[in-house]
Image (cartoon, helix red, strand yellow):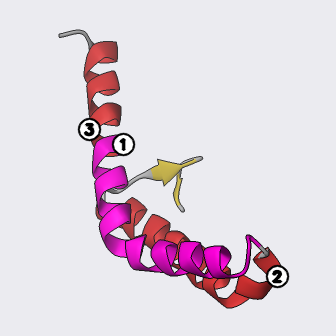
């Protein structure tokens, strides 16, 4: 396996892990947001708290995921 192919495989596996783990971690917040939007006819302003909670979950997950898998961006853990 070439170096490039190995990197592509690792990136693909990491992407699959990210997708699976973020669903596990943030699905509840996404569901609450979707439900709120449904009840409020897609009025985002009526669902600010749910939207903020969902975004916060994603931000926190991103940080933890990068630390867990030692992902560096621009030479720095972000």
Disc with the residue nearer the chain's start (2 vs 3): 3
Task: Look at the picture and state if 21 lies above or below 2.
Answer: below
Q: In the rendering, which numbered label is found on residue 15?
A: 1
- Residue 70 horizontal/vertical position (percent): 35, 56
Which residue does the numbered mark 3 point to in the structure image?
13
Task: Look at the picture and state if 37 lies above or below 18.
Answer: below
- Disc 2 and disc 1: Cα gap in Å? 32 Å
Residue 56 visible from this viewpoint:
yes
Which residue does the numbered mark 2 point to in the structure image?
45
Q: How many other residues sit within 10 Å of disc 1, few (<14), some (14-19) or many (≥20)?
A: few
Disc with the residue nearer the chain's start (2 vs 1): 1
Q: Quadrant of residue 68?
A: bottom left
From the viewer's side, name the closer residue of 18 and 5.
Answer: 18
Q: How many other residues sit within 10 Å of disc 3, few (<14), some (14-19) or many (≥20)?
A: few
Residue at 42 percent of width and 73 percent of height: 26
Q: Quadrant of residue 27?
A: bottom left
């Amino acid at each position: 396996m070439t170096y490039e192919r190995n990197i592509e495989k690792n990136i693909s596996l990491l992407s699959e892990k990210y997708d699976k783990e973020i669903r596990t971690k943030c699905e509840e917040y996404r569901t609450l947001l979707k439900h709120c939007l449904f009840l409020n006819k897609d009025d985002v302003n009526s669902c600010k708290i749910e939207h903020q909670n969902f975004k916060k979950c994603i931000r926190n997950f991103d940080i933890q995921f990068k630390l867990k898998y030692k992902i560096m961006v621009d030479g720095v853990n972000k």
